[in-house]
Image: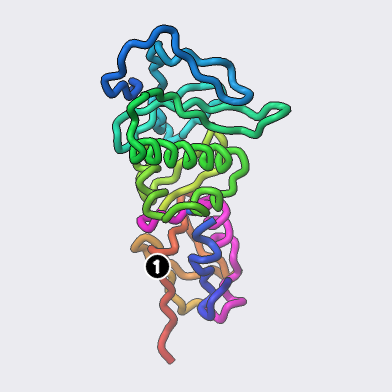
Amino acid sequence: MINKMGLISSNTLGAINRSGIVKNNMPTMPNTSIKSAGVQEINMSNSTNGNRLYVDSNYNLSLENGQVYSVQTIYGLTNYKFHAATATTDDYVQLLYFDNHISDQKRVALERTRQFLQDLQTFAETGNAAYLDTARDNSEVLAMFETFGITPDTPFTLNGNPHRYRIDDAGLMHDVDTETNIVKEKDWRKYGHNEDTIFVADGVEYRMDENGKLPLPDDFIYKYEKFKIIKPSK
């Protein structure tokens, strides 16, 4: 939706939204194993140390199918395994945790994290962030991304794909490249603005050129909450 000032609203541009298994004093079990449909048998009597699910130095978050990742939960680091689709199953995430005495509260919390990771897996593969907030509040989405080392307003990528995203303070996911390109390529004259209109982006003032476009720097990143339009008084 485009408002009367010609600015694309946040509703349109905005929401598109190191190791160690949690042992919990687990007793030694004699070759105990569990099975999940379409998954190779996993021996839960052996501790499996997964790689911490965390952004790398390039702010990229990798989710590789077949890998075990250690994820921060309210009960500490817990291991989850990402599985690729097979002929009989869709992509899914498996909780690697076994405890005969686990409480219902803990079981629900770890399952909720598993569901989020599965939605994250789908987001990474499709680019559709709507999967993240269909079953949870935006505040929960933000809290989960912060456990991956992703902070508000800093662009990140997924699985090495160059397309960038960012999450804001409200937990809304933004498609950085799409939103930024729209603002940079927009002809602002078509929305009632002229050379006297002042555009403020990240505290810097800009005026449109003869083509109605803003002379924004190459590294500009559009953030609706830091973009203002000041029209001259009549």
Q: Position of residue 136 (x, y in %)?
A: 45, 52
Residue placed most toward the observer, 201 or 98: 98
Give the answer, above or below, for where 190 lies relative to 149: below
Is residue 57 among what the camera can see?
Answer: no
Residue 30's quadrant in the figure? top left
Give the residue drawn at x 29%, y 34%: 75
Q: Which residues are the magenta region?
A: 168-194
- Extreme residue toward the top, this view: 30
Residue placed most toward the observer, 67 or 1: 67
Q: Is residue 34 magenta?
A: no
Give the residue drawn at x 56%, y 24%: 36
- Extreme residue toward the bottom, this view: 234
- Report helix, strand or loop for mark 1: strand
Q: Position of residue 101 (x, y in %)?
A: 33, 27
Name the residue tied to disc 1: 200
Residue placed most toward the observer, 168 or 74: 74
- Extreme residue toward the left, this view: 25
Give the answer, above or below, for where 20 lies relative to 140: above
- Which amino acid, mark 1? Val
Give the answer, above or below, for where 133 lies relative to 185: above
Residue 48's quadrant in the figure? top left
- Extreme residue toward the front, this view: 101
Is residue 38 among what the camera can see?
Answer: yes
Give the residue drawn at x 32%, y 24%: 22
Residue placed most toward the observer, 128 or 42: 42
